[in-house]
Image: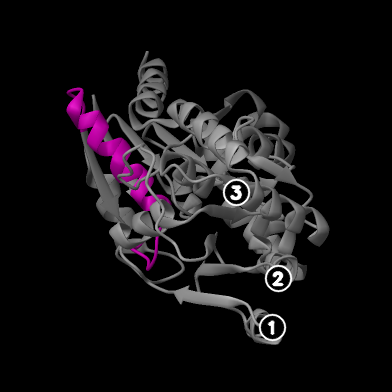
Amino acid sequence: MKVVIVLRRPTNGHSIELVYQKICDQLKIIGISASIYKINSKSFFPFRDIINLSKINADIFHISGDVNYLATFLPTKKVILTIHDVGRYFELSGLKRVIFKLYWIIFPLLFADLIFTSSKITQSRVQGFLSLTRNKVLHVPICTGLNIEPKINIKNNKKFTILHIGTTKNKNLTNVILALQGIDCALRIVGNILPNDYELLKKHKIDFQNYINISDQEIIALYQEADLTTFPSFHEGFGLPIIESQLAGTPVITSNISPMIEVAGNAAHLIDPHSVKEISQAVTSFIKDSNYRAEIIKDGFRNSERYSAKIVTEKHLTIYKQLLE
């Protein structure tokens, strides 16, 4: 079996491409011929890449990472398409929404042999777009692409340190800032801080540090050194920071909505992401109760085992084989 995993152009930061590099590496370990093809073109329609892909002799092309449209142009191949999130569709309007729906969702769904979604809520949303594809949309979880060794790390922080991953609006940094008013802690933020959030940080005199375009090892260190991770997103396709934090031995506060609630696996403190009060109370509970913190850390290690690279890759391989039968 020869598998080619097709990914978008390399991007800054930590993205889904790392996940599929890890899966590719695991496939090689178990004797499968697997490789990565990264789109080179910057254009809306990467003609040269489509030609290159059509010339590759592979049993399966697995497309992932926001290049869904490629499934439309490989109809003679066995094509699997992973869709991690369709939240962007609901944020668009007018002609942009129509084009996005056709180009990124409808046509790829029609031409792909199978569609993977990393969460059940995305599976349900994708199935809702086209009833004809209902039986070929499968929920297939993913693993982290970071090499985090699961262990308890001794924290040497002068202040209780909170790590917040992501700064786009859906990551809910605003409510985290508001929730930390009056709490003696240090906030570490990964991502470009939006102007309004920056003003709030200054206004409420939050002790914070900002990290942008950091390496894999630096993000791993941030997870390991933090006393707590906040991830109260309004919507996600999966929620990798939950698993990454659990692997690093750091407890997590996350949203009581899908897919975070399923990914967390009863091993995180769930809150209403719209409630500043609930976020604040959750942070305080971790600061004051070391036993509760230790319990969540222990449960987190156990939950993260469900998303190991080995288990996730074996799930992928089983479906690959079924597709070729």
User: What amino acid is found at the position of numbered circle 3 in the picture?
Assistant: Asp
Q: Is residue 26 magenta?
A: yes
The answer for how far apart the CA atoms under marks 1 and 3 are is 26 Å
175 w.r.t. 150: above or below = below
Say which quadrant the C terminus sits in.
Answer: top left
**Label 2: which residue?**
174
Give the x, y percent position of residue 8. Answer: 38, 58
**Label 1: which residue?**
196
Whether residue 230 is visible here, answered yes or no, is yes
Q: Residue at x 35, y 63 (%)?
A: 9
214 w.r.t. 304: above or below = below
User: What amino acid is found at the position of numbered circle 2 in the picture?
Assistant: Thr
User: Over which residues does the magenta segment extend?
Assistant: 7-33
Q: Residue at x 52, y 34 (%)?
A: 300
224 w.r.t. 42: above or below = above
Q: Residue at x 48, y 40 (%)?
A: 246
Crowding near the residue tagged with mark 1, few <14, some 14–19, many ≥20 C-alpha atoms within 10 Å: few
The answer for how far apart the CA atoms under marks 2 and 1 are is 8 Å
